[in-house]
Image: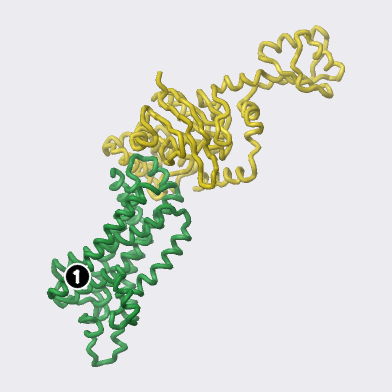
Chain colours: A green, B yellow
Amino acid sequence: MSGLLPLMKRDLKKWYRNPVFLLTGLIQPFFWIALFGSAMDITRLAGPGFNTGIILQGAANYITFIVGGVLTITALFTGMFTGTNIIFDRRLGPMGRFLSSPIARSSIVFSKIFSSVIRILIQAGILVLAAAIIPNGLVFPGGFGLVDVLVILTAIILIALIFSSLFSVIAIRMREMNTIFGIVNLINLPLLFVSYAMFPKDFMASWLSNIAAYNPVSWSAESIRMVIINGSLTASQWSSLGLWLGALALLAGLMIVITYIMAEKEIRD
Amino acid sequence: MEPIIKVENLTKIYKGGVRAVDSISFEINEGEVYGLLGPNGAGKTTTINMLTTRLSPTSGNAMISGHDIIRHSLDIRKMIGVVPQDLTADEDLSGMENLLMVASFYDIPRSIAIERSKRLLEMVDLLEASMRQVRQYSGGMRKRLELIIGLINEPRVLFLDEPTLGLDVQTRTTMWDYIKDLRKNYGMTIILTSHYLEEIDALADRVSIVDHGKILITGTPTELKASLKGDIISFGFRSASDSQAVLEYPKGLDVISSADGMVKVRVENADESLPELMSFLFQRGIKLHTLSVQKPSLDEVFLQYTGRSLREEGPADRMKVMMNMRRVRRT
């Protein structure tokens, strides 16, 4: 795949050179944390004196609780743009050049997916920083160690791969920008709200919670939350963490295979 | 000599049963400039897209320098250069960055790529603008950039799909000069599509006239023009009786029309016949009011083989050309 690196370089260049992309991508995480984290703070509903730790699964405050969810959602939203970028390349012409160059067809799509993962990681770094800086923000009760970093990185990379590939596959044969925006709008709300990203499971209607348990957004949000909230994990916590990350890895692997096959066979002008 | 390109019964049927390219076959020799001439929708671009492996054929095959377009598509893409009809450069990158990106698709080492890009940019007079974003380029500059992007891998075979579509006359002539130079300096084999007759006439060694996905005739522009059997001479006389005199020419004339003192005749070669005709008329004391000689152009050839003029395009086609022009001219 000799086209992979030059194409990733191109994508990232376009991103960091465009001040609007850069600023919105970087400011948005702040908004999520500061605005959503304050506006939707469910511990206020409980009233003073109530042990909020029970609602928040042991988190010190709501911001600490939702960081895992916001990181996951950032990956979801940025991943959605991977598909629109493919359509832009098709409509503005560069796709024709890529298709007549001696590069693997899949490298056209994977360059978009991988550069999107890199963008998401940069945003995630800023987000964690933002959450830690603001008053009454992110707290690591057990300290911030290598395990935390590894688990957070793994979860974000996997969820970013899953959604970037999903929206790339949708865009592989698509010409209409409106169609993909429609699809994005249709699925981002259920993915976001039928998950444990923003609200604790005990807070949800049981039918909703049952569905949310199978949402990859929940797997990623819960994995990150678990290592942030808990200093050292118990055996049962390790096993749920393993289950979530394993499921994410399996899904990411499956999406990559589907993307590869679709890109090699189906991509066109 | 073995032809460098051999196309055999190449066919593309789009969804809905439209036969865009209908079992066409042709051969192109190394170093030749070969033109595909036809109106919009004739199947020229589809043919080019199949030969450049952007599109897979429904049936049939083609060989480029011994590689098969279906099984060895990657080998072919390494060897050919493509200048597609649409603009393909990334508007957010500079001209130089576009060239270097495409160069890296061919695994050309960076130092060689930089040196080659500079030479190509200089060739088409873009060196000064090479660090500017492509979105700031004019339509002519963008077409020139497209041309050299297609040359970055020093291809043996170059595909030019409507290289001057939407350009003004002056810019078009400059493009022609670049294409002529390429052929002269590098001996490149060039396949050119166009719906401009002048373009094919100026550049191509051989031309195929394409319509409705089929090749109607192939030959050198001169051969095709000669196949029309001659030139047309139009005489304008002062009176209708004078015009009778020319009809009495002893060698006989192929008269196309004769009315109101205007007589149009077809001769094999006006350069030879005209002096004889003139002296014949002169001896009879007949004076001419007007005289014109029309050498056949590819226009007439096209009319002859397709039954319609290339310039009479339907409103839909004209609309498409306008849209393309606007895209090209957009700055």
Front-most of A40 and B99?
A: A40
Residue position marked by numbered label 1 in the rendering: A241
Residue A247 is at least partly visible in this image: yes
Residue A23 location, x and y as percent? 35, 64
The relative height of residue B84 versus residue A183 in the rendered view (above or below) is above
Residue A105 location, x and y as percent? 35, 46
Where disc 1 sits, the SS reads helix
**Residue at point 44% right, 60% down?**
A180
Front-most of B3 and B97?
A: B3
Front-most of A152 and A265?
A: A265
The relative height of residue A67 versus residue B28 in the rendered view (above or below) is below
Residue A49 location, x and y as percent? 23, 92
Q: Quadrant of the N terminus of chain B?
A: top left
Check the image and name the residue furthest to the bottom: A49
**Looking at the picture, which amino acid does disc 1 mark?**
Leu
**Residue at point 35% right, 44% down?**
B97
